[in-house]
Image: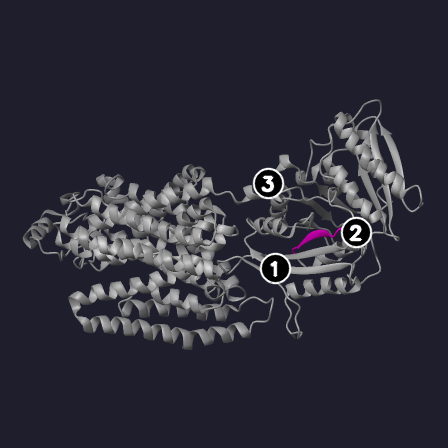
Amino acid sequence: FTMGGQPDLDPVISGGSIDPAMFAPEEMQFIKKMGDLRIIPICVPMVNLYSRGFFFGDNPLDWFLPVFLLQLSIFCAMAATLHHHLKSLGQTSIVSNLLGGILSGPSFLGKTSIFRRMIFPVTSYYPLSTIGLFGCMFFLFLVGVKMDLKMVKRSGKKAWAIGILSFILPLILTVPISFYLRRYVAAESIRDSLPLIAVLNSSTSFHVITCLLTDLKLLNSEMGRLATSSSTISGMLSWITLVVAFSVKQSIKSGPATWILLVFSGFVQVMLTMYVLRPIVMWMIRNTPEGKPFKESYLFAVFLMILGSGLASDVFGQHSSFGPMVLGLTLPDGPPLGDALADKLDCFVSGLLLPLYFYLIGRRANFNLKDSSYVWVLGSMSLLGVLGKLAGTILPALYCKIRIQDAVILGLMLSALGIVDLTFYSRALANEHINQDTFTILITFVVIISGTVSPLVHFFYKPSKRYGSHKKHTIQYNRRNTELRILVSIYNQENVPAIIKLLEASNPTRESPMGIYLLHLVELMGRATPLLVEHQVKKKPTSQTTQSDRIINAFRIYEQQNQGLVTVTPFTAISAFSTVHEDICALVIDRIIALVIIPFHKQWSLGGDIESIKYRNVNKNIIEKAPCSVGVLVDRGILGGMRSIMGSWTFSRVGVIFFGGPDDREALSYALRMAEHPNINVTLVRLMADGSMIGSVMERKLDNDVVNEFRLSHTVETDRNDYREEIVMDAVGTVDVIRSMENSFDLLIVGRHQNETSILSGLTEWNEFPELGFMGDMLASSDFESNISILVVKQLSYSSN
């Protein structure tokens, strides 16, 4: 095959130098005759795909498939090992993959002839590169589909100011200096490429920022949302600038007519994508009923569009990823298309093909530089690009009254480098706009900058810290005769009936109304940007309703039935479940909420139990990090038969188990509201150890105060409510008392943690659901055979935050 003027692209021919050990003597004589010509023919024997096997005398490493599988195994093992050790330092996967490629490249392991000839032979390079480019193309398409271009319209002045200045200031800083530094570079090829390198170092990409924030789990944070919006604006401007810069650079050798054709062909492809391909896909989406999966035939047609767009881009002189990325940007994010593509492609593309692409780019870095005198010039250009992005972000952020610490963190986020930068570096190398040494130095600074930015953001930006500095939000300390604000998190429609009945039992009155903040949690799939949407009352009902609409309608009916007593403010949070608790924490702080109610992750039904690990992880994060009290509702009442929202059933018999401690006091404070409801009977059962005191003197005083309030206010003047004390000797007696209450109540309220006492010893050793505490775990376990529902309450304390 012919190297086409790019001998440095081959791992065997590094920096233009040839290893004689790789070729036969007659081949070397021919190469020497070629002299300094840049086109070097290399004869490579045809390699078959499959090996017959070791027992037939075949060497597996002489065949392509065994070599390919060995290469993938080495790559995966090396990348996984590096990522395992670097992850604790806050490094993202791109650094691990690039380092793995560099270590196996010509400067390190690639120096050994065995590794170079047997594991990474010449014949395997181009198939691997093709697979890597294929992964890059599909990844940029997927990110384009997940990107919501409407965000640009919705972005406020703050995001627009940061996005535009973070694009302009780096260019103002780097481009003029690149012309000044040309006088210090003797090599003509490098001197002519400095302006293009300045533009490359000044670019920002939405894809890179989103990947960084996803890896660091900061997409839902305040600065993460602002960085996403700003990078969308600056990324679009950067992409347009780079396309124009590459077209101009290519036209210098080919003439202005080539530049016109390149720009025109790119424009035609964008128009065809918008007005031909997009309408076809939109027709497919309209013909997919809500809640139904995207048809396989439709998905196959979309795959053909991706491949055709990549082919057209390559034919017209653009990067093969240009067409698929434009196609992805024009298509709507979210279900049904986004979900289907994420389900089919995300794991394979992001988990294997894309890391392989990074790995291969790292392998092309060769540190045996011909001339290292200009390293400082390229390094200065890279650092100036970072400084320009920092300045372009921090200055408008400070003007918008963002704290200096957050402004610096935001600047670091927008300074990250990643896949788009690597793609343009590779394109510049392939088009001979930069040489091999320049490419190596640029890759090195990608590793340095990314390896610095990610740990700094990881260690110095902790969104949850701001939640601990606010005053307590609890029911116990919520002033009487004021509005009680409750945030209700819903996963699906099955959670609605029990939660609405719990709210009805909470006794809203005109003196103490309730403000309900409804939050429907939807997992982020098929889109890159998390959304927190506040719903307004629809003037005209629509024929097609979503699950969110049905949930909101149920709470609207509840609000209308309690006019003047309850106000409902509905939200939908479309977010990754690993970070959705950040949305809840932000709402708690902004709306001064006292209690968050979440449904238990396990649902009981007549047909069997359904347990969701994803819901459980969300609940754990909310319980541990919410800056207010939290109640987990375990709805087992459905075992007695199907229940509807409009049914006549209610939590009319409520029991409270009290040992002592902050969580038990919070549970009893909530029950105090219920005790005032004319149709609800509340029974307080206080379990006490025989002959011993539970808790410290101060704790006992606080416990007695809230118990006496219940006794004096709700049991003396009415016989609806009851109070009784149970003296028990040990944990067995405690379990016996609780089991005797199995069929006495509709709802049982307990605290998450209790003061340490001998009557609870041994109950903590076999917890199935430790997030509920040992009392909640015992009541929610499969051994507790009852239809009773349980509310486990945790009170906010300064120590927990």
Q: Nearer the viewer, mark 1 or mark 2?
A: 2
Give the amino acid type for the residue marked by disc 3 in the picture.
Answer: Gly
**Label 3: which secondary element:** loop
Number of residues whose C-alpha sits closer than 10 Å to that of mark 1, classed few (under 14), some (14–19) or many (20 or more): many
Residue at numbered disc 1: 572
Circle nearer the N terminus (1, 2): 2
**Label 2: which secondary element:** loop
756 over 182 or under it: above or below:
above
Circle nearer the N terminus (1, 3): 3
Residue at numbered disc 2: 506
Q: Quadrant of the C terminus?
A: top right
Residue at numbered disc 3: 468
Number of residues whose C-alpha sits closer than 10 Å to that of mark 2, classed few (under 14), some (14–19) or many (20 or more): many
Q: Residue at x 72, y 56 (%)?
A: 515
Q: CA distance from mark 1 to mark 2?
A: 24 Å
Q: Residue at x 56, y 66 (%)?
A: 293
**Stretch of the chain drawn in magenta:** 481-491
Query: Percent from the top left, x then y, of residue 265?
Result: 29, 73
Q: Nearer the viewer, residue 669 or 418?
A: 669
505 over 284 or under it: above or below:
above
Query: Percent from the top left, x then y, of residue 27?
Result: 11, 51
Q: Quadrant of the N terminus?
A: bottom left
Instruction: Answer with the quarter of the image where residue 423 lies.
Output: bottom left
Give the amino acid type for the residue marked by disc 1 in the picture.
Answer: Thr
